[in-house]
Amino acid sequence: MSSKLQDKDVPWPYNDFLFEIDRGDVSLSCAIAPAYRDVRLILKRGSDKLYELNATGVEDVKYEDRNGVEILEIILSAREQIRLKVKPRIEINHRANTEP
């Protein structure tokens, strides 16, 4: 997964990052603004939008590479997480727990 900085002259926490991944006819776009803790995801098949997330004030974003399996975890709150597997294929697992 490669990222593009919006502005090369702006320090990391205040910059915006755009990640784009294509797997066949499925594409995933992920924009992250660390200073604001904002995340936007768009999953498409061809030109058809399948899923969109616009989250503000997320708790954390974590990246893992487990032996070639790339995973991005977005922790929206203590009760809600989104886990994206982006390699070898794109998968989304959105978990929500309503229990306190």
Image: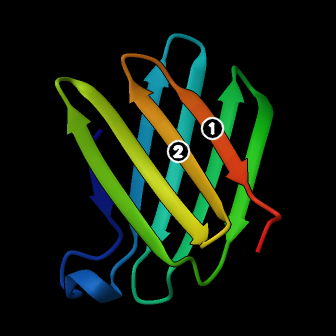
Please give the label number shown on residue 83: 2
Q: Is residue 80 left or right of residue 72?
A: right
Q: Is 57 located above or below residue 30 in the figure?
A: below
| Quadrant of the image containing the C terminus | bottom right
Q: Is residue 93 left or right of residue 5?
A: right
Residue 46 is situated, as x and y percent measured from the top left of the image, at: 69, 20
What's under tag 1, amino acid-wise?
A: Asn
Q: Is residue 71 left or right of residue 96?
A: left
Please give the label number shown on residue 57: none
What's under tag 2, amino acid-wise?
A: Arg
Earlier sequence position, callout 2 versus callout 1: 2
Circle 1 Cα neighbour tier, 10 Å, few/some/many (<14 / 14–19 / ≥20): few
The CA span between labels 2 and 1 is 5 Å
Q: Is 16 located above or below residue 24 in the figure?
A: below
* Secondary element at image label 2: strand
* Secondary element at image label 1: strand
Q: Which residue is mark 1?
A: 93
Give the residue drawn at x 29%, y 85%: 13
| Quadrant of the image containing the N terminus | top left
The residue sitting at the front extreme is: 100
Question: Do labels 2 and 1 touch, CB within 8 Å?
Answer: yes
Residue 88 is situated, as x and y percent measured from the top left of the image, at: 36, 16
Q: Is 14 located above or below residue 90 in the figure?
A: below
Q: Is 80 located above or below residue 90 in the figure?
A: below
Give the residue drawn at x 74%, y 55%: 96
Image quarter for residue 66? top left
Circle 2 Cα neighbour tier, 10 Å, few/some/many (<14 / 14–19 / ≥20): some
